[in-house]
Amino acid sequence: MKKSELFVITGMSGAGKTSALKILEDFGIFCVDNVAPSVIRDFVSVLIESKLKRLAIVIDVRVILKFGSSEEIINQLKSLDNELSIKIIFLDADDDIIMYRYRKTRRAHPLSRDYSLKESIEKERQLIAPLMHEANFVLNTSNLEIQDFKNHILKLIRPSEGEIPPMKLIIESFSYSYGIPTDANLVFDVRFLANPFYIPKLAELSGKDPRIKDFLEKSKVLKKYMKSVNSVIKTTLSEFSSTGRNQLKVAIGCTGGKHRSVYVAEKIYEELGATFGDNVDIILQHREL
């Protein structure tokens, strides 16, 4: 039986641990930030009992300061060797790059209460050096663009080429009467199409019904509109992927959320499903049905 995998993300503050954690979460790995050494074993046991196969925890200098030394953390991890496949990923960056990132974001370094920024970085290197020496992988992020960073992280966690999930595209129809979905990246308004609600024999049907399809496809502009919408979605999906994101949500709205938006959402799902195949995981949702 294959062991569950534990990825330990550690390294210098400002080197990209939070970004790495988000990438792992996007690709289906259960992630927890800042786990105290004393509870690592109990925490991992609970997750294994939950039948989670891939776990990731972040350990940074804040954990070391509050809960124990790097050596204690290493000993805790080594005690789990027989139960888990453990990979320690250490993220580093040049001191001047870390200083630049902190000044740019105006965030405080975890050690800034007692030291200047330069001194904080030097002190952190001393505290976290044992973890760097134990790491399976050391990645310097100083000159990495976000997509390069994402690719490096995925290579480190990828057991085989086929086990990383594809991009996710969520298509959701909705009613403007009940509000636009707040998590949508793209919103398309199809209220310009003739409304079947005002046709007595069509009013009680949904956009999934062939009779609604026949009614809406009489529109002279629909085909051109669908082509434009699909083009925008494909371009946005491609650009999202190139910037390290793993999900795009598209919302299609009409007045009642039952006829026009449902039909258009179904149409997008059908056409893009044929275009992308297994390369994109497409999910179709009708909020008001």
Image (cartoon, rainbow, N blue to C red):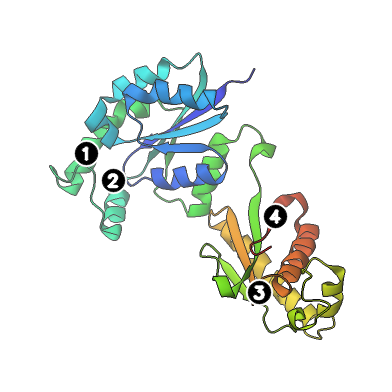
Instruction: Assess disc 3: are there few (<14), some (14-19) or many (≥20) residues with their C-alpha within 10 Å of its C-alpha.
Output: many
Disc 3 from disc 1: Cα separation: 60 Å
Callout 4: SS:
strand
- Which numbered disc, 4 or 1, marks the residue closer to the eye? 4
Disc 4 from disc 3: Cα separation: 24 Å
**Mark 1 vs 2, N-terminal side:** 2
Q: Amino acid at mark 1?
A: Glu
Task: Quickly name the residue at label 2.
Answer: 95
Residue 20 vs 183, above or below: the answer is: above
Residue at 73 percent across and 83 percent down: it is: 193
**Image location (x, y in percent) of residue 21:** 45, 43
- Which numbered disc, 3 or 1, marks the residue closer to the eye? 3
**Mark 4 vs 1, N-terminal side:** 1
**Image location (x, y in percent) of residue 4:** 56, 24
Task: Quickly name the residue at label 1.
Answer: 122
Residue 105 image-quadrant placement: bottom left
**Mark 2 vs 4, N-terminal side:** 2
Task: Quickly name the residue at label 3.
Answer: 256
Instruction: Assess disc 1: are there few (<14), some (14-19) or many (≥20) residues with their C-alpha within 10 Å of its C-alpha.
Output: few
**Mark 4 vs 3, N-terminal side:** 3
Quarter holding the C terminus? bottom right
Seen from the viewer's position, the closer of residues 100 and 255 is 255
- Which numbered disc, 2 or 4, marks the residue closer to the eye? 4
Residue at 53 percent across and 57 percent down: it is: 243
Residue at 28 percent across and 46 percent down: it is: 95
Instruction: Assess disc 2: are there few (<14), some (14-19) or many (≥20) residues with their C-alpha within 10 Å of its C-alpha.
Output: some
Q: Please indicate whether residue 214 sits to the left or right of residue 173 in the image.
A: right
